[in-house]
Amino acid sequence: MDDQAALFSIIKERSFRQGGEFTLVSGRKSTIYFNLKPTMLDPEGARLIGAAVAAKAHELKLAYVGGLAMGAVPLVSATAAMSAVAGTPVKAIFVRKEAKGHGTQSQIEGLAEGESLAGQSLLVVEDVTTTGGSAMQAISILREAGAQVEHVLTLVDRQEGAEDAFRQAGITLHALFRKSDFGKDLA
């Protein structure tokens, strides 16, 4: 089984639920739910995700990978580690939903003293994308810090408007998987 198929299998087994009613971050209701934390925190899932995201960041020639806490933290951590293993290091950061109230009071974490995102190319990552709102929140903060953000990578695109929203903002969405991959009746 190749890495893509292995990752799909882990997601389907550990992170995909169908039936019942779930409220999504966007506020929408759905009978399909993806909770990617069990996959992101699974040793093999983390390795496969990190390798896939690191490969995409390298392919796009991006210096950083980042996203909105909490969902992006395991993604960027796995990516940084697997990019080093692959010999194509990409730095990782994450964006807090609000600046912390102590220490440096930073909203962007992962930069050492004196480091800046100004002029740096960055791949924003998400575990699951519905409307793109969470990624756009992170992108706004990152662009304010001077980062160049033109790409978002999601593990699973729910195919509910994010791709169009990103396109209108001049951003390309890359999805490892789409909701329709989990069943032809889910398209």
Image (cartoon, helix red, strand yellow):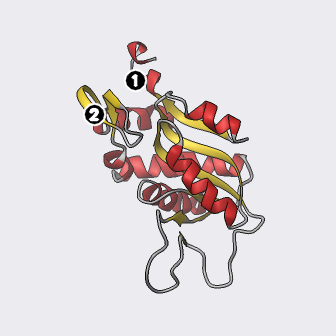
The residue at 69%/74% (across/down) is 116
Task: Report x, y in % for residue 81.
Answer: 52, 62
Give the left or right position of residue 175, taking residue 64 as reference. left
Task: Report x, y in % for residue 126.
Answer: 50, 47
Give the left or right position of residue 79, taking residue 143 as reference. left
Quadrant of the frame with the N terminus: top left
Which residue matches tag 2?
Answer: 22
Give the left or right position of residue 30, taking residue 164 as reference. left
Task: Report x, y in % for residue 166.
Answer: 64, 38
Task: Report x, y in % for residue 27.
Answer: 37, 38
Q: Is residue 114 above or below residue 7?
A: below
Residue nearest the observer in this picture, 89 or 106: 106
Q: Is residue 90 visible?
A: no
Amino acid type at image mark 1: Phe
Which residue matches tag 1?
Answer: 182
* Residue reaching furthest to the right: 119
The residue at 32%/33% (across/down) is 33
Residue nearest the observer in this picture, 72 or 31: 31
Q: Are marks 1 and 2 in contact (CB under 8 Å)?
A: no
Amino acid type at image mark 2: Phe
The residue at 50%/57% (across/down) is 68
The residue at 54%/56% (across/down) is 67
Give the class, few, some or many, for how many residues have Cα within 10 Å of label 1's Cα (few <14, many ≥20): some
Please tell me whether mark 1 or mark 2 is closer to you in this view. 2
Q: Determine which quarter of the picture holds residue 74.
A: bottom left
Q: Is residue 21 visible?
A: yes
